[in-house]
Image (cartoon, rainbow, N blue to C red):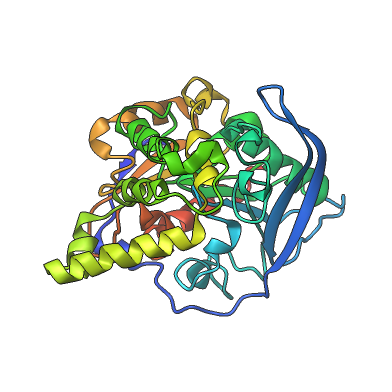
Amino acid sequence: MKKLIATLTFASLLFCQAKAQQYPTPAEGDYVVKNFQFGDGSSLAELKLHYTTVGQPKKAADDKVTNAVLIMHGTTGNGRGFLTPLFAGNLFGPGQLLDANKYYIILPDAIGHGKSSKPSDGLHMKFPAYTYDDMVKAQYMLVTQHLGVSHLRLVMGTSMGAMHTWVWGYNYPDMMDALMPLASMPVEIAGRNRMMRKMIIDAIENDPQWKGGEYTQQPPGLTYAIYSLMFMVSSPLQWQKAAPTREAAEKFLQERVERYRSGLDANDMIYQFDASRLYNPSPHLGKIKAPLFAVNSADDQVNPPELGIMEKEIQKVKNGRYILLPITDQTSGHGTHSNPTIWGGYLKELMAISEHQN
């Protein structure tokens, strides 16, 4: 496949727009792994992995599942976060790209997130210091050992889930037909990206009321960590449109902070943002076999295109392609990763060219 950088036209931005349609009722479940071993040698007697599925597995004559799609969420998120009118409503409905009447869609909660095992369950800062490799290992066990899926039609993810997609690609290169990381880079987390993550961690740990992780109510440092997180994923254009006056801006800020605080835990957040510390796919990209479309948005402040990283790294991927979405009224910075009305045309192309890979 020719390696290139593609730019969307206004017409193609509208290509995949569709009204939200119904899809099969999602089902939730748990898989408990006994004595899960982490990369640093630590272990957990019982690691609970929560997941959501949409659709039913279909099997070939050899009893192998042929229609499984794995989609992984971003930092602080969970699998059910994809069940929105914007995401699922434009992908999972009848006749849509990932029609859940045709595909078996798997939405796991990563370690430390959602309803999977996490520090706030009780271990606090004694919880194993998991990494992205540990999280992907757990996802692999969930998919293969619990759900009985030995091959995936598509592996995709947003933000942290996109970084997990790269790790899946080189750790299990024969496992999938196609890969689509949305909003990521396949290199070590460094520069401003790591600084922002360290700022989030320090804002909590430097707060005396954090009490080494043994707080009884969320410490004020969590709010300061949220400030950093908000700017990390912000969209100047969309925020200006949403808050064009001083009063509107201050109200917007207050509402966003309150919404974040209602769903976050300080210890969990420390672990979630530090889990990327050893992530670095760059030396392993040559192992990836399946067609891979890496999609970023030009207004993504987490993965700014001016760094020139993707142009270099995608050359290491045999069947890789880098797609840079231009800034438009529809893009929303880092959050563009969850808007298939913008990048759906590329997903359609990827599914078509990978249909007969295996």
Quadrant of the frame with the C terminus? top right
Q: Is residue 148 visible?
A: no
> How many numbered badges does the structure rendering display?
0
The structure residue drawn at horizontal position 21% and vertical position 65%, both measured from the top left corner, is 250
As drawn, 250 above or below 61: below
Q: Quadrant of residue 214?
A: top right
* Residue drawn 37% across the image and 40% down it: 203
| Horizontal side, residue 195 vs residue 9: left or right | right
Q: Which is nearer the eye, 170 or 137?
A: 137
111 or 265: which is nearer to us?
A: 265
Residue extending farthest right: 62
Q: Quadrant of residue 253?
A: bottom left
Query: In the visual, does 310 lie left or right of 25?
Result: left
Q: Which residue corresponds to the image point at 39% horizontal and 65% vertical from the top-left?
A: 341
Q: Is residue 81 left or right of residue 206?
A: right
Q: Position of residue 75 (x, y in %)?
A: 49, 47
| Up-down relation of residue 242 to residue 292 (above or below) | below
Can residue 151 be seen by looking at this rendering?
yes
> Residue 335, how many percent across, how many down?
37, 56
> In the current view of this chain or complex, which residue is farthest to the top?
283
